[in-house]
Image: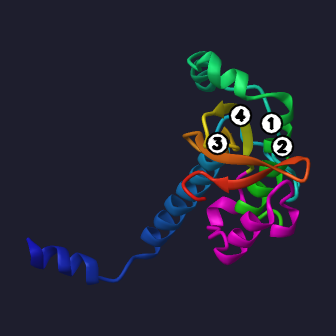
């Protein structure tokens, strides 16, 4: 059996077989291109400018379900002032994180947090460059004394939303992001 397969593999291809093979490959390539075009993830924009900023949008059904489970304590922690401070930081940070903006575009961060981000630059994969992140929901979280906690639910067109935790601190009369979740 092995000898027969080897002889079949090594034999010359007839002219009619070449045409059939070329037509088959062409049809498969066109079909794959059509399927890839039609399988764009739901909610992902077809075209957007490379500098488009993340935006706060109405939550998906999953995020609405999570939001309904929030305690009243976390809702009261998220005042309009806290939400504006978190949104200001996240707009620049998500642009930087996905390679759409330089680190200088990050506003609303303490100098110490900016130094930390410069010391450990973001690793941007080619797949991240094409994604357009946006904040789906913001939620207040408990934090250490003198700090305010915020958890942002982010969607970048992928399958799963993810959260980014922030710590906001008063700094010269403003609320600034002083740390990301997991780092102080």
- What residue appears at the point 74 percent right and 46 percent down from the top-left corner? 168
Q: SS at mark 3?
A: loop
Report how far apart the C-alphas of labels 3 and 2 lie in the structure: 18 Å
Report how far apart the C-alphas of labels 3 and 1 lie in the structure: 16 Å
Rendered image: mark on residue 136: 4
Depth check, mark 1 against mark 4: the one in front is 1
Residue 102, visible in the rendered structure: no
Q: Residues within 10 Å of mark 1 (few under 14, many from 20)?
A: many
Rendered image: mark on residue 99: none
Q: Is residue 32 left or right of residue 6?
A: right
The earlier-in-sequence mark between 3 and 1 is 1
The earlier-in-sequence mark between 1 and 4 is 1
Rendered image: mark on residue 82: 1
Name the image quarter holding the C terminus: bottom right
In this orientation, which residue lies closer to the viewer: 48 or 95?
95
User: At which x and y percent is residue 134?
Assistant: 75, 42
Q: Which residue is mark 2?
A: 85
Whether label 3 touches label 4, CB < 8 Å: no
Q: Which residue is mark 3?
A: 145
Q: In the image, which residues are magenta?
A: 103-131
Q: Residues within 10 Å of mark 2 (few under 14, many from 20)?
A: many
Whether label 1 touches label 2, CB < 8 Å: yes
Report how far apart the C-alphas of labels 1 and 2 lie in the structure: 5 Å
Magenta stretch holds residue 113:
yes
User: At which x and y percent is residue 41?
Assistant: 64, 40
Q: SS at mark 1?
A: helix
- What residue appears at the point 67 percent right and 31 percent down from the top-left corner? 139
Report how far apart the C-alphas of labels 4 and 2 lie in the structure: 16 Å
């Amino acid at each position: 059996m092995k000898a027969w397969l080897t002889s079949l593999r090594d034999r010359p291809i007839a002219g009619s077989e070449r045409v059939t093979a070329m037509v088959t490959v062409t049809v498969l390539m066109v079909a794959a291109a059509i399927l890839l075009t039609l399988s764009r993830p739901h909610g992902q924009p077809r075209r957007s400018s490379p500098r488009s900023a993340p935006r706060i949008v109405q939550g998906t059904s999953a995020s609405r379900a999570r939001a309904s489970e929030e305690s009243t304590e976390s809702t009261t922690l998220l005042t309009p002032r806290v939400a504006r401070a978190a949104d200001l930081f996240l707009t620049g940070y998500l642009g930087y994180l996905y390679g759409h903006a330089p680190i200088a575009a990050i506003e609303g961060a303490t100098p110490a947090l900016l130094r930390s981000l410069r010391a450990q630059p973001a690793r941007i994969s080619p797949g991240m460059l094409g994604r357009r992140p946006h904040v789906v929901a913001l939620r207040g979280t408990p934090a250490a004394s003198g700090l305010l906690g915020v958890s942002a639910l982010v969607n970048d067109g992928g399958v799963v939303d993810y959260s980014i935790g922030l710590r906001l601190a008063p700094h010269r009369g403003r609320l600034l992001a002083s740390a990301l979740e997991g780092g102080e």
